[in-house]
Amino acid sequence: MSQSHDLLLYTAKVCPYAHRTELALEESGAKYDTFQVDLANKPEWYAEKVNKASKVPTLVVDDKKPDQFNLPESMVIVEFVSDLFDPVSTGNTIHSKDPKVRADSRYIVERFAQLVVGSYMSAALKQDVVAFNELVQGLRTFNELILERSSQGPFIKGDKFTFADIGIAPIFGRILTVSKTNLFPSSADAAPIHELLEKDASLARVKTWWEAVSARPSWQKTYDEKLIVDMFTKRIQGAQQQAK
Amino acid sequence: MSQSHDLLLYTAKVCPYAHRTELALEESGAKYDTFQVDLANKPEWYAEKVNKASKVPTLVVDDKKPDQFNLPESMVIVEFVSDLFDPVSTGNTIHSKDPKVRADSRYIVERFAQLVVGSYMSAALKQDVVAFNELVQGLRTFNELILERSSQGPFIKGDKFTFADIGIAPIFGRILTVSKTNLFPSSADAAPIHELLEKDASLARVKTWWEAVSARPSWQKTYDEKLIVDMFTKRIQGAQQQAK
């Protein structure tokens, strides 16, 4: 399809929110340029020229044209990409045309964040064992939620990779990477998350989902696990030393 | 217009998030029933039957029918209401048809929350003077943001009351009510917010906006200021006593 706008994405490989927007653009078949922002050392012009809140991601539409439009906030960008690329012409389907499916997809992204993000951050950065056990419980509740929506999947809303998968996969992927890298605190109550995912019946639907997500070409193109391991190892090992 | 779904909204007058959904339903001309949830004493069946997260608002679509659909999360409900009621047939316009306008409206609701909600809560409930000054500064930044979008307004995106107004007005209205009731801590650096709104040039665009919002029939029907003053006075005076 022809694309009516030039798109420039300010992004950062480490950031799960920025990652959502890369997945949305890939799944839409969009042509876009990227600028990698070093979050530990942001360019001085970034806040002034691109995003006053100085955060990634920001999608710049029609850069250098009079009607340039700078759009921050990850799920706002995903909605916008969904609006720009008509699924009929691209074959992609970030959003269903059914208002109930769209609404429930937006809800489950919010609910996953409530269940998982706070405990993930505390478990990783504060090495908080209580938060780690809450994280495991949050993932089990997530398993129930997606089982209710589509028992077989493999994706959250059925056989298509859509908005809900885009909103959730970048956070889940990082949780799994932190687990495999042994950067969570160890808990007497729960095995490491990557081991639970293989054997725990209460995460079986998540396992099916994750296998399908991580095999997706858009995922493989956008997730740089080695870089994330390097960055998280430095940051979390610092936290582990402080916790001792 | 004929309405194809039965709608039942679980809501609470005190809650700014629930208030958003009442505004959206009113602006759409929807027919809907409400159930007021006492947040201090929730019915036992609420979490089990309506919303596992036990929060308001929740919109129940086609209650008591086989395809009953329970939708939590305020802005998710506003999006859903916008999808259900076609502006062409109702004359209402929660969302513009322009993807850029829709996207920027979603962004500004997020940005207002980042600028204002945390400092508002700390100023009111912790009687934190630093947070109060941050709140005033956040409102001045909000003034700049909406001035950039529409210098005359009166609404955030121009002459129509839309998604961005629905997302922001319920929070701003409560801030103003708390100020008029003298429930914020006093600050040497800033006058009370309701006085600033009348005379401070850096809030002039917010003043224009607020006069148009608060004159809106949907606002007048859904905002019960007396009830909110009563509830906030008890809660915040308790915090003020503790802060002494």
Image (cartoon, coloured by chain):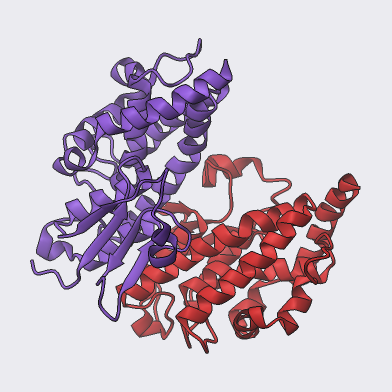
Chain colours: A red, B purple
Residue at position x 49%, y 33% in the image:
B121
- Left or right: A121 as drawn, with respect to B113: right
Relative depth, front residue between A128 and B172: A128
Relative depth, front residue between B33 and A243: B33
Relative to A222, is A38 above or below?
A: above
Relative depth, front residue between A134 and A81: A134
Quick check: can you spot residue B87? yes
Q: Position of residue A36 (x, y in %)?
A: 66, 58
Relative to A243, is B180 above or below?
A: above
Corner quadrant of residue A188: bottom right
Tell which residue pokes out farthest to the top in this image: B188
- Left or right: B17 as drawn, with respect to A185: left
- Left or right: B238 as drawn, with respect to B161: right
Relative to B158, is B192 above or below?
A: above
Q: Position of residue B186 (x, y in %)?
A: 47, 14
- Left or right: A157 as drawn, with respect to A23: left
Quick check: can you spot residue A171? no
> Number of callouts in the render?
0
Tell which residue pokes out farthest to the front in this image: B44
Q: Position of residue B50 (x, y in %)?
A: 38, 64
Q: Position of residue A56 (x, y in %)?
A: 58, 53
Residue at position x 40%, y 57% in the image:
B73
Tell which residue pokes out farthest to the left in this image: B1
Quarter placement of the N terminus of chain A: bottom left
